[in-house]
Amino acid sequence: MEPGEPQEPQEPREPGPGAETAAAQVWEEAKIFYDNLAPKKKPKSPKPQNAVTIAVSSRALFRMDEEQRIYTEQGVEEYVRYQLEHENEPFSPGPAFPFVKALEAVNRRLRELYPDSEDVFDIVLMTNNHAQVGVRLINSINHYGIAAATIFSPSRDVVVSQSQLRVAFDGDAVLFSDESERIVKAHGLDRFFEHEKAHENKPLAQGPLKGFLEALGRLQKKFYSKGLRLECPIRTYLVTARSAASSGARALKTLRSWGLETDEALFLAGAPKGPLLEKIRPHIFFDDQMFHVAGAQEMGTVAAHVPYGVAQTPRRTAPAKQAPSAQ
């Protein structure tokens, strides 16, 4: 029969007893499946002022390489058509997917310990359907100073923990201001070491990701208060190019002055960060320098570039020397 061709009316049939039994069995199996799938109690939606809001883009959460290729090569109409044709096919997980899964795992533990608490992670999926919306979002982020970073996919897949959220931070221009990096850029390492020693007891100003570490610390303390410090599903790391002997004390004293700490503080004295991150296996690592982001990528770490500080200033290239004119 061709589509759209009218069908002959048929006499209704009375289902036999076997059909009724089979239908009831199918319905009962479907109900059991749904009951097991759906949560018994829907989690309470947190208020924005109480939750730690994490906004993640669709292209970071899912792999959309093919869709992006179609959009770039064939235009928006073909892109939309392709999406409609494949709307029932789920996307593959993207670089931020394990990070979000770890956030959800922490939320589950928090709700077990504090059923009525709204002090949890609130994950927001963001996508850009129009270029002007994207521009407005960027302007809004700059206006309010909301910490943001660009996530880069790792060069290879590395298995990360599914039960413990691990977040690694660079220090200068990430947790702290770029005050010290400016001295390095302007006067070199020797002057930097002298400055840090002289100002060891003066806390650094805060950087763009200080608030995120603060939020993680607040949630960690909820587990500590239940005697679960060693079993806490959140672990934080400071991974910095500073040297422990010459400039590490100021970083640690700055965190202490804020009432914050990291579970581990790793001072690499200028060594590459990638190999160490491979051992830590964080769900995400924040750094302000693309050199370290690229090194983390090569070793399988999901790295996020924080566009803040003096490292973002384009280097000035010396003007090309003109060849002497022939006499």
Image (cartoon, grey):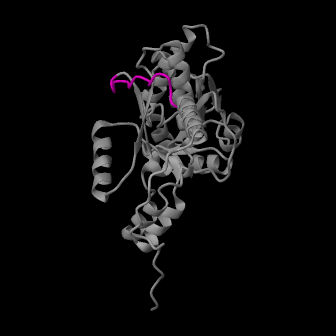
> In terms of image quadrants, where is residue 314?
bottom left
Q: Does the magenta-highlighted stretch encompass residue 45?
A: yes
Q: Is residue 169 visible?
A: no
Q: Choose between 13 and 107: the one closer to the eye.
A: 13
Quarter of the image where the C terminus is located:
bottom left
Count of numbered circles on the image: 0
* Residue 180 at x, y percent in the picture: 48, 35
Q: Choose between 37 and 27: the one closer to the eye.
A: 27
* Residue 138 at x, y percent in the picture: 32, 48
User: Residue lying farthest bottom?
Assistant: 327
Q: Residue at x 47, y 39 (%)?
A: 183
> In terms of image quadrants, where is residue 8?
bottom left
Q: Residue at x 52, y 18 (%)?
A: 110
Q: Looking at the image, is 17 positioned above or below residue 117?
A: below
Q: Is residue 117 visible?
A: yes
* Residue 155 at x, y percent in the picture: 65, 53
| Residue 54 located left or right of residue 35 | left
* Residue 293 at x, y percent in the picture: 57, 47
- Majority secondary structure of magenta residues: loop
User: What residue span does the magenta drawing correspond to?
Assistant: 38-49
Q: Does the magenta-highlighted stretch encompass residue 37?
A: no
Q: Choose between 317 and 100: the one closer to the eye.
A: 100
Q: Residue at x 61, y 7 (%)?
A: 227
Q: Looking at the image, is 275 positioned above or below residue 247?
A: below
Q: Choose between 184 and 258: the one closer to the eye.
A: 258
Q: Looking at the image, is 118 positioned above or below residue 13?
A: above
